[in-house]
């Protein structure tokens, strides 16, 4: 095998060393345009997981790295005059220059041909002369650009600005500095990497960056290899209180915009991408060097494990791509949190620090409690009640906890009349402990049903059937019971007449084309919603939710993708809001003040040209002004060509956006399935309530089981008297075993806190709990 590697950074060198170690007879050549002692950047951070992989793959490299690591376990958050510390995290960092030297020496020992100060030939030329070409040529990869169509490259350049610097101040922990100024918020990500230096990344939102005067400095000519010294001196002035007389150190340091690199595939014939050439993840969540070295390990292993290059490259991509995409999802959440940091700077220091630490959704309430219980206790204000079990006032109701069972489409009704299955479903969910249970997708008219099996609330028989259900539920539980009212519009099931919608657009190619709603249709719609709301009140429901999302009729009016009208009910957002607000105001007049009125929206259409974040915020504000007590924030299902970015609690950022931009109470929904996620969302202030859907169907007693798992036995999670025998966890295999003491002298509990104190000769640290 002849292998060509373009780029002698950590990813390329590590791959070359591992490949040569596994196959000494292979010819491995690395082209690196810089000199061996040239380096850009400062410190590199590694996780314990990655270090375990390095230790297993090449003990010499791991030993050399470990000898120079700065290690610590604490994260400091400096905000509004306070420094809050969370321990138990576990970090290891070393200088990029040291890392390159270690890898260069290892390559030399293994007889890898590394050609420094040499520009690599084009990838197309190398692909003819070599069996494999590995492109490690960075975020601006020429190789990737040459085959962009094949790779399916997507470059997402963000608007915020950042500058990578060093400092001769040695921080004792990973330190987030959040400084508020008249021009906006300035934040810093800082961490030590040796006994004399720390990495120091300054980041700002674009408009704050302009108002602070940095645009003028950035506009000056800064040739390659030079730094923006004016901006650096200005940062020193602004951050003087945190630098304690120390200096900021440049290394080709200029203001940059972060670009997230994604590729549909990482391979083209015998050419493969590695590291930043294939993918990037925002620096606030992880190290690009770490990801590149993980890539290198898997690629080297795949080449060793498979009989030919094509199958090895396929295996490499199949194994690494899901891992990278998971990291990128977390990094995207973190990136967006820092881009919109001004949404959170009104929070008190403890909640702000918790919000910051859990921003990516990888670190959670439970996770932090294991790492540093004192920190989470302080954030929780010493309460022993988990955040999810705190009561919440919603409209005229007082919910006993923060868990909502969202509307579930059961499709079991006959002629719109709910039956025994609806009774069993709703009563079981109510007895399962949630604070609010919503009956789902109830049509306000016969032609407004999404399917023939959907329930309705347009006649006396349906009203009586619902009353039977609410009487039974309220007789067994104090859970609040609500109902969602809707007209499906263009998503309505075919009945004996053509459906109507905001505009004559079929849902998909198999659906009938609706007619455009006229004035008579809209007047009838308002009357139908008002009539159904009155029936819902008489039927005994405590809460009412209006469905303005998921492509149903009123959602169709709100979205610019489905409302193409040219009259006063179309056009700009004010026009698109007109009918939804008419319906809401009319319902508000007849719905009792002592009950709750909610509206569900799709805050994003997941399609180009759809509802924007600014639209979502404006819609929520308008709904609150018209009488909504809270907004149930969902996304999507507005157009059939949507492309959602699914993932754990993937819709929560939209509830977060609306709540923290407007102060309006929100319900977060979408792939929320663990009590840990609910606690994290509530405590961080991302939403006021959490809708737990599929997990509640999987386990109708989900809320009660969450209470048992957390040792909570208070009034927010009451067990029905008949079920109290099951309120404790049943015994299972070996749970009754009490282990004997086998230590003569007990070891003291390991501290959650570890600082980087390079000048003190400290013993080897105890393992950090994970």
Image: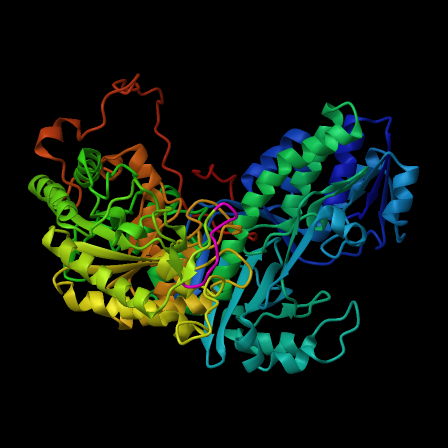
At x 53%, y 51%, the residue is 641
Q: Does residue 79 show up?
A: no
Quarter assignment of residue 221 = bottom right
- Residue at horizontal 23%, vertical 48%? 456
Name the image colouring.
rainbow
The residue that appears at 10% across and 54% down in the rendered structure is: 538
- Height in image: 126 above or below 398? above
Q: Is residue 60 above or below residue 606?
A: above
Q: Is residue 539 left or right of residue 436?
A: left
Q: Is residue 594 left or right of residue 99?
A: left
Q: Position of residue 431 (x, y in %)?
A: 16, 38
How many marks the image carries: the answer is: 0
Q: Is residue 576 left or right of residue 665?
A: right
Quarter of the image for residue 129 reads top right
In this rendering, the answer to whether 739 lies above or below 615 is: above
Residue 20: x and y in percent read 80, 31
Residue toward you, 743 or 224: 224
Residue 508: within the magenta?
A: yes
The magenta segment is 502-510
412 and 141: which is toward the camera? 412
Check the image and name the residue furthest to the front.
496
Residue 559 placement (x, y as % from top left)? 44, 63
- The one of 207 and 255 positioned closer to us in this rendering: 207
Quarter of the image holding residue 444?
bottom left
x and y, in percent, of residue 580 in the image: 32, 66
Residue at position x 79%, y 56% in the image: 38
**21 inside magenta stretch:** no
Of the 4 image quadrants, the one containing the N terminus is top right
């Amino acid at each position: 095998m002849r292998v060509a590697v373009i780029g002698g950074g950590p990813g390329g060198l590590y791959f070359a060393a591992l490949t040569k170690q596994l196959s000494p007879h292979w010819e491995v050549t690395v082209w690196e345009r810089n000199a061996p002692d040239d380096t850009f950047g400062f410190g590199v951070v590694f996780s314990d997981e990655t270090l375990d992989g390095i230790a297993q793959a090449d003990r010499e490299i791991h030993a050399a790295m470990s000898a120079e690591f700065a290690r610590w376990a604490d994260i400091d958050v400096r905000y509004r005059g306070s420094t809050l510390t969370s321990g138990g995290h576990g970090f290891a960092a070393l200088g990029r220059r040291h890392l390159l030297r270690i890898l260069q020496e290892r390559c030399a020992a293994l007889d890898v041909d590394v050609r420094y100060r040499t520009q690599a030939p084009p990838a197309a030329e190398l692909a003819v002369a070599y069996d494999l070409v590995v492109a490690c040529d960075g975020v601006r990869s020429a190789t990737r650009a040459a085959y962009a169509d094949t790779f399916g490259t997507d470059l997402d350049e963000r608007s915020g600005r950042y500058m990578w610097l060093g400092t001769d101040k040695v921080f004792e922990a990973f330190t987030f500095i959040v400084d508020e100024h008249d021009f906006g918020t300035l934040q810093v990500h800082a961490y030590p990497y040796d006994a004399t230096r720390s990495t120091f990344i300054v980041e700002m939102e674009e408009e704050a960056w302009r108002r602070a005067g940095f645009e003028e400095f950035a506009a000056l000519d800064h040739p390659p290899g030079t730094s923006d010294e004016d901006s650096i001196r200005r940062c020193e002035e602004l951050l003087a209180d945190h630098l304690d007389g120390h200096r900021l150190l440049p290394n080709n340091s200029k203001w940059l915009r972060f670009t997230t690199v994604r590729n549909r595939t990482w391979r083209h014939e015998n050419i493969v991408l590695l590291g930043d050439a294939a993918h990037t993840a925002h620096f606030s969540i992880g190290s690009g060097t770490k990801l590149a070295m993980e890539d290198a390990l898997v690629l080297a292993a795949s080449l060793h494990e498979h009989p030919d290059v094509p199958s090895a490259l396929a295996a490499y991509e199949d194994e690494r791509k899901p891992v990278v995409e998971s990291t990128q999802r977390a990094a995207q959440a973190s990136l967006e949190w820092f881009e919109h940091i001004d949404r959170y700077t009104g929070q008190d220091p403890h909640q702000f620090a918790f919000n910051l630490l859990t921003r990516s959704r990888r670190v959670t309430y439970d996770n932090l409690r294991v790492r540093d219980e004192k920190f989470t206790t302080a954030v929780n204000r010493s309460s022993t009640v988990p955040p999810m079990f705190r009561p919440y006032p919603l409209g005229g109701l007082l919910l006993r906890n923060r868990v909502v069972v969202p509307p579930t489409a059961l499709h079991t009704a006959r002629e719109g009349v709910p039956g025994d299955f609806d009774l069993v479903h709703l009563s079981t969910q109510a007895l399962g402990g949630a604070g609010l249970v919503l009956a789902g997708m109830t049509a306000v008219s016969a032609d407004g049903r999404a399917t023939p099996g959907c329930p309705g609330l347009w006649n006396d028989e349906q009203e009586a059937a619902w009353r039977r259900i609410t009487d039974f539920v309220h007789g067994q539980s104090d859970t609040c019971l609500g109902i969602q009212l809707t007209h499906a519009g263009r998503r309505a099931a075919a009945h004996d007449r053509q459906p109507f919608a905001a505009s004559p657009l079929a849902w998909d190619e198999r659906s009938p084309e609706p007619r455009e709603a006229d004035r008579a249709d809209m007047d009838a719609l308002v009357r139908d919603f008002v009539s159904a709301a009155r029936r819902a009140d008489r039927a005994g429901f405590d809460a009412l939710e209006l469905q303005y999302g998921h492509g149903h009729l009123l959602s169709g009016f709100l979205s610019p993708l489905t409302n193409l009208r040219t009259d006063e009910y179309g056009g700009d957002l004010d026009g698109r809001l007109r009918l939804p607000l008419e319906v809401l105001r009319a319902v508000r007049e007849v719905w009792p003040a002592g009950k709750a009125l909610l509206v569900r929206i799709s805050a994003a259409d997941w399609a180009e040209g759809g509802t924007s974040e600014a639209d979502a915020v404006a819609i929520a504000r308008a709904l609150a002004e018209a009488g909504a007590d809270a907004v149930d924030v969902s996304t999507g299902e507005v157009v059939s060509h949507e492309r959602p970015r699914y993932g754990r609690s993937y819709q929560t950022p939209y509830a977060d956006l609306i709540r923290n931009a407007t102060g309006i109470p929100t319900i977060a929904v979408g792939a929320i399935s663990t009590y840990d996620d609910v606690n994290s969302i509530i405590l961080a202030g991302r939403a006021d309530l959490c809708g737990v859907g599929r997990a509640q169907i999987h386990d109708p007693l989900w809320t009660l089981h969450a209470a048992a798992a957390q040792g909570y036995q208070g009034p927010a999670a009451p067990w029905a008297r008949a079920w109290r025998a099951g309120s404790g966890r049943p015994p299972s295999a070996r749970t009754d075993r009490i282990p004997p003491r086998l230590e003569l002298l007990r070891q003291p509990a390991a501290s959650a806190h570890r600082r980087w104190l390079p000048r003190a000769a400290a013993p080897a640290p105890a393992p950090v709990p994970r």
